[in-house]
Each structure stands twice: as structure tokens, then as C-alpha cells.
Amino acid sequence: MGRSALPKLLPLLAILALLQGCGGISEGSSGGSGPKLSLVAYSTPREAYEQLTKDYGKARFSQSYGASGDQARAVIAGLPTDVVALSLEPDISKLVKEGLVAEDWRTADHHGGFVTKSVVVLAVRKGNPKNIRSWADLVRPGVEVLTPNPFTSGGARWNVMAAYGAQIAQGSSEPEAVAYLGQLFKNVPVQDKSAREALQSFVAGKGDVLIAYENEAITAQQKGEDLDYVIPDETILIENPIAVAKESKNAEAAKAFTDYLRTDPAQKVFAEKGYRSVNAALVDAARYPAPAKLFDIRKFGGWDAVMKKFFDPDKSVMQQIEEGLGVGTS
């Protein structure tokens, strides 16, 4: 290896070492025969994808899981990928900007580029001993709240916008809703890098309530963890994107896999793992009730506007809140 290649390789090596240290990379293959595909995904759907790659049977897979923002940066740094499944649209947009995902990824299917849906819920200790029922309960004195760092975790960004939007839905002004976020994060003792790490902290005994994806709470229950969850009356619709990498050496096979993920059998697997299907006909209303005041990211101008206003690492709502708490934004 020449000296000129080393500086470009060092960031990738550092990211790969971090992912391996966190158990983020699955070194083996799963699935059946056929071409080898690399799946790079955010942390929470790991159980679903591990089953789906086995069920698919038409390809072999290597898999990498981690915080959505970290995964996007790893792909930009050179982590090989054929299929990228991230927490939220802006992380895919970063890859589009770098020329790693096609600009028309959202029109590649009739689901707008999304593969799963969910909502933000409040996971609590079994029996709900702190009687957590609403967003107002999260800013009570003495209530410890867990949520990841919104500058590394896509899940955390959904959590922030759910909390903010709930205040707006309740009739608060924008300054009042921002003030609520400041109060909320004063009750957060630790901000993990990903939604899965935050869940691990919660089940290990940290905190009274975890702001989380509904599917993450259901997955924890399926694993036997002693927790319940509350769907607040006001919460946000989560839509999770997936895309084929432009430089995939097996682009046709990668596209076939993403198409499979939207079929009824695959969507039923997602549903078993706690996700709401992108096919409305497959959503069990008894298991997945519609919140009274459900809103989506378009209520706030879409992700481009939200990222600038709330999550710019140099000047934004959350940058100011985190800076006041002494928490990093990079």
C-alpha cells in the first residue's frame, strides 16, 4: 500500500474498529446461495434483518449495525455496501450528496423509499411505578429519562421531534415547545450513541423511562425484558428508508432484495418484530392502535428544514440545549 492511500484509509479503519468493538459488524454470511450482498443498517431492526436475510434465500449477506449517523459516515468513508437501511431520510440524503445513492431513490418504489413505519413511545418499568402517562410526566422532578444523542442517533432525532411536536399539538407556542425540550434534556442523565445502546442502558437499570421506537419496546418485551410502554396521545409517525448503493457490484440483486422487503411475507416479519407495515392493509389496529394526535415530519417543513433548525451541530435548537448541558454535538 502506498503512502498516499493511507490517509484516506485511516478514517475508515477507525470507523470499522469502532463498529467491531460495539459488535456492529456481522462478519459471517447469512442467507442462501447466490451473490454476496452487504447490508449496512441502523441498530434497531437488527433482529428483523437477521431473520429476513435468512428467509430470502436468493443471496448471501454480510451485515453491519450501528447508530444511523455513524453508519452513514462509515459508508461515506468507504465501508462497502450494497443495501443501506437507515433510521431517517437525512442520513440517506448525505449519501445522495456524496454520489453514493441515486437521487431518485425515493421514487424507486411506490412506498416513497420507505420500508417500515413506527411511532415514538415511552418505555417504562414493569407496572409503570412512576405512573408515566404523558409527555408532561417526563419533566417532573426526579424522573430520569433516557434518549440517545441526537447528533449521532437517528432514533434520537425522531424522539426530539415527537416531544417537540407533542407540545405544539397540545397548543403550546414554538418557544414554549423549545423550552420543554430544554426541561426534558435536563432530566436525561446519559445520552448513548444509538437507540439500541439506550435500550441496553435502560434494561440494565438506568432511568425511569426510555423514549423509543414502538418496535424497540416490543423487541425488548419479546426478549423477556421487564418493561411496559405507553403510546402517548400525541406522537410522531416514523418512516424508515432503504436504498441500493450506486456503486454496488450486484445492484440488480440488491434491488431484488429491497423489493422483497416490501412484499407481504417480509412485511409480516417486520410486524412480528414490532414494526408497522408500509402496507396499510397489513397493520393490525388492535396491536398497533392509531394515536389520537399522530403527526409526521412534514408538519415542521420536512427533514431539510428540521435538520437546519433543530440539529445543525454549530447553531440549532438542540446544539444550544446540548451546549448548555456540556454534551458534544459531533
Image: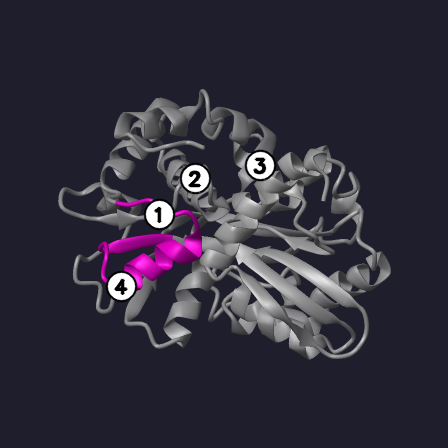
Mark 4 vs mark 2: give the one in front: 4
Q: Which of marks 1 and 4 is in front?
A: 4
Tag 3's secondary structure?
helix
Q: Which of marks 1 and 4 is nearer the N terminus?
A: 1
Q: Which of marks 3 and 2 is in front?
A: 2
Name the residue type under label 3. Arg
Which residue corresponds to mark 3? Answer: 298
Do tag 3 and tag 4 residues touch (Cβ < 8 Å)?
A: no
**Front-most of residues 72 and 4:** 4
Distance between the Cα atoms at labels 3 and 4?
35 Å
Image quarter where the C terminus lies is top left
- Magenta span of residues: 190-211
Residue 57 drawn at (x, y percent): 74, 78
Residue for badge 4: 204
Measure the C-alpha gap from mark 1 to mark 2. 8 Å
- At label 1, counting other C-alpha atoms closer than 10 Å, the crowd grade (few under 14, some 14-19, many 20 or more) is many
Using the numbered discs, state the Cα–Cα distance from disc 3 to disc 2 in whole angstroms. 19 Å
The residue that mark 2 highlights is 150
Residue type (three-letter) at the residue carrying disc 2: Pro
